[in-house]
Amino acid sequence: MARELFNSPEKKWVRENFWLPALLDFRKRFPADVRFNYLTFAGPEGRDIEFFTRENPVFSIANIRVWERSDRAASQLGQKFGPELQIKCGEAFTLSSAEKEAASFPFAVINLDFTDGFFNLRTRKALPDKFEIIENIARHQQRHACGFLLLLAFNAAPDVDSEKGQPFVHRMALDIATRYGATKALFNLTRGAKNNYSDVLGDLVPAAIVRVGAEHAFDTICSGKAIYRPYSRRKSTMLCFSFEFQYDDPPLSQSRFFVQRRMEDLIEKRQQESLKVEAIHVNERRKPPGKAVSKRARARYRKLFPGPTPPRDCY
Ligand SMILES: C[S@@+](CC[C@H](N)C(=O)[O-])C[C@H]1O[C@@H](n2cnc3c(N)ncnc32)[C@H](O)[C@@H]1O
């Protein structure tokens, strides 16, 4: 099969069956008088832009802004979509905190479609860069009292995160295990998580996102998780999430401390809910009929996709 950059069959599946339904569902609750716009990492070909403007017209080109760190990709994208598309060249980490860029907020849908790992820090830091980007974005959106849909994707292969990043993962696993008795991630990490690192992060990352949302007055719900391996390559395992950030709109008469106390309960509730959201394993779901499967695989299929039992010998 000819390989196209950022356009594997699995990625196409994610656009169509994960991003699009999340987006259409979110749009139903979005205020009709607020601009429905999109901030994205589109890549040189802008396949998501094509998908959301031509194949499933949800946005117009003029309502899309792109952050792109590669000059070459940005110029290719500009040539393809013309001057109506807003393209800002730079690192998302810098752009998310740049004063000038703050004027482009708020956005209804934000798609942080990273290509590398979430915890691949090179130096010791209080926060991983990607997490700080999300904090900066939440702050901009809060200023405009604007709820949003966050689509987040990053590489979650077992060896992608650095030694400096691993302690963040371990501390979250310990926290989730001790506060909620959810020990699966911690158990897998202590065994190396060679085959299930993406599932481990699938359990842990939402708890951190829920927390950062709540600290910026958003009731934050993890509405979906998906794991895919482009062209079945294990090394490039990608983990995707959708999060709804609903603005809580606290009355001006309530103190920050009072709001925080209320949010504390919400954080616990949403974190626990996020642990129950099952990740869709895209490659398994896409397997063509007729492939022989083991009893174990069939049981896993049934757990993931309850409903009619699949035929005896196929997915
Ligand atoms: C996975 S591709 C985007 C694919 C697109 N969303 C789609 O559905 O076809 C990611 C793009 O974002 C850029 N990118 C990745 N991390 C970035 C960052 N931290 N800041 C700015 N651009 C980034 C990459 O250069 C690449 O062109």
Image (cartoon, grey):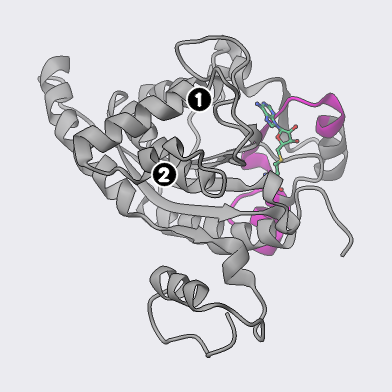
- Front position in the image: 230 or 160: 160
User: Which amino acid type is marked by label 1?
Assistant: Gln
**Position of residue 172 measured from the top left corner of the image (x, y, whole percent):** 36, 29
Question: Relative to 286, is 127 on the left or the right?
Answer: left
Question: Relative to 161, is 86 on the left or the right?
Answer: right
**Quadrant of the rendering where the N terminus is positioned:** bottom right
Q: Is residue 184 visible?
A: yes
Which residue is farthest bottom? 312
- Front position in the image: 192 or 21: 192
Q: Is residue 269 above or below residue 9?
A: above
Q: Quadrant of ligand 1?
A: top right
**Position of residue 28 measured from the top left corner of the image (x, y, whole percent):** 39, 57
Quickly name the residue at label 1: 166
Residue lying at 17% horizontally and 22% vertically, measured from the top left: 260
**Position of residue 280 measured from the top left corner of the image (x, y, whole percent):** 49, 60
**Position of residue 42 measured from the top left corner of the image (x, y, whole percent):** 71, 40
Give yes or no for residue 70 being in the magenta stretch. yes
User: Which amino acid type is marked by label 2?
Assistant: Phe
Q: Is residue 197 above or below residue 75?
A: below
Q: Is residue 218 visible?
A: no
Crowding at dot 1, Cα within 10 Å, few <14 / some 14-19 / many 20+, comes out as some
Give yes or no for residue 152 being in the magenta stretch. no
Name the secondary structure under disc 1: helix
Question: What separation in Å lies between label 2 and label 1 (alpha carbons)?
Answer: 23 Å
Q: Which residues lie in the magenta part?
A: 48-74
The picture quadrant where one finds residue 287 is bottom right
Point out the tag, 2 or 1, that comes first from the N-terminus. Answer: 1
Name the secondary structure under disc 2: strand
The picture quadrant where one finds residue 244 is top left
Which residue is farthest front? 191
Quickly name the residue at label 2: 243
